Amino acid sequence: MNDHGAPVLVWAWRLGVVCRKELVQFLRNWILALFMLYAFTIMAYQNATAISRELKHASLVVIDNDRSHASRSLIYRFQQPQFRIHELLESSRHGIERLDDGDAALVLDIPQHFDRDLQSGRPTRLQLQLDGADSARAYLAANYAGSIVRKFSADTVQKRFDDETLPIVQNDQRVWYSPNHEETLFLAIQDLAQHIFLFSILLPASALAREKERGTVEQLLVSPLSPLQIMLGKIVPMVGIILLASVVTLIFIIEGALALNVRGNLALFLGVTALFSASAAGLGISIASLTRNMGQVGIVSITLMPILFMLSGSDTPPEMMPDALLPIMYLSPLHHYLNAAFGILIKGADITTVWDSILYMAILGGGVFAFSLVRFRQSFR
C-alpha cells in the first residue's frame, strides 16, 4: 500500500491493525471479559430487582379500641404491597414494645367512640407511631398513611352529605411513563449507565496500563503510528465491546428477564452511548497516563467512581444536592448521558428532545479527549 497514493486509507488501515490487536488482547484477558459479562447480565438483573426505594410490606400493628364498622373500614385500607398487618393488640403499651423490639414499623391506635364521633360530625383523632430508625422508610410510611387517612376522611364526609350539594376539589392524577409507579425500569437503566461509565474508563485504562507493564508501549511509539492512532486504537474497540454489552443487557435482561417495555429508538440510544463511552474512555486514558501499572489504575478508578457517580445525579437527585455541587454536576458527562438515556428508553424521546444533552456530552467529551491526547503525548516524550 502506497503512503503517498492513499494516505487516508493507510491511516485507516493502521488504525484497524491496532484495533484488531486490542480486541485479541481483550479476549485473552478472560478474567476481565467474564467480569464484564457478569456485570452486564447477572449483576444488572440483581441491581434492578434487589434494590427498592419504595415502601413494601411495612409491618403494621393495630390497636382498635373502638371495634366498629368505621374502624374496620379504615384498617382494611392499609393493604399490601405497602403495608402488612402484623398483629392486633389490646393496649398501647404493647404497641410501644413492638416498636422497641423491631417487630413493627408502625402502630395505628384507634380511640374509643371513633365511629360515634364521625357519625355526629365531631372531630376525632388517630395516633400513628413509627419506628424512625430508618428515616427514609418512616417518611414513606407516614406519607402513605396520611394519604390513606385523608381519603378515608373525605369519603366519610361525602357519605354524610350525599343528599346535599357540596363543593368538592377532585384530585385527578395522571402519571406519565410509569402509571403503576414501578421503579424497576428506572433502576435497570441507571445501573446500565453506571456499568457503561465504569467499563468505558476501565477497559482503555487497563489496556494502556498493560502496555506499560510489558514495555510494549515504547514499541508502539517508535512505530509509524501517531499518538492519536494509538489512543483511538485503545478506545474504538472498547467502545464497540461496550455497545455490544449494552445491547445484550437491553434485549436479554431488561426486555427479556425483567419483561420491561423499553421505548424509543435503539439506534439513537446506541449512538448516544457511543459518544458517551468515547468521552469516558478519554478519562480512562488520562488515568492510565498518570499511573504506572494496573494496580495504580485500579486504585485511582475505585477512588474516583463513587465521587463521579454521586456528582452525576444518578444516586443523589440534583434537587437534594448542595448548591455548591450543582455546577460540578453539570460538568459530568454521566449526568447528561443519564438525562438522554432516560428520555430515550423510558419516554421514547427523539433527538429533538435530547439534543441539548448530546451537545453537552460532545463538548465535555471533546475537552476530556483533547486533554488525554495532550497528556498521552507528554508522558512518552
Image (tube, rainbow, N blue to C red):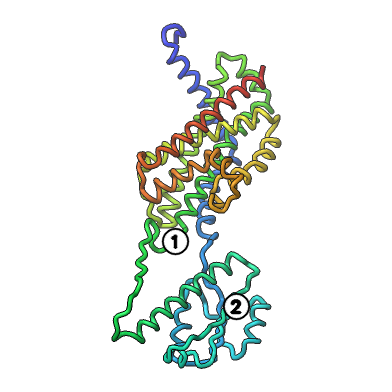
User: In which quadrant of the rendered image does the N terminus lie?
Assistant: top left
Q: Residue furthest top?
A: 4
* Residue 83 point in image, percent of width and height: 51, 75
Q: Residue at x 56, y 13 (%)?
A: 224
Residue displayed at 61% across by 45% down: 324
Is label 2 or label 1 in front?
A: 2
Q: Quadrant of residue 182?
A: bottom left
Q: Residues within 10 Å of mark 1 (few under 14, many from 20)?
A: few
**Regarding mark 1 in the picture, which secondary structure is present there?**
loop
Is label 2 in a helix, a strand or a loop? strand
Vertical comparison of 29 with 321: above or below = above
Indicate which disc, 2 or 1, sits on the residue closer to the N terminus: 2
Task: Say few, some or many: other residues with alpha carbon within 10 Å of mark 2 (under 14 / 14 to 19 / 20 or more).
Answer: some
For image coordinates 35% across by 82% down, the residue present is: 158
Quadrant that contains the C terminus: top right
Q: Is residue 164 above or below residue 347?
A: below
- Tag 1: amino acid: Glu
Residue under numbered circle 1: 182
Residue 262 appears at what percent x and percent y? Answer: 38, 51
Residue 107 or residue 4, whichever sits in front: 107
From the top left corner, tell me how far across and down residue 86 is, in percent. Answer: 56, 81
For label 2, the residue is: 129
**Foreground pick, 186 / 227:** 186
The image shows residue 246 at horizontal and vertical percentages of 46, 43
Compared with 97, 2 (above or below) is above
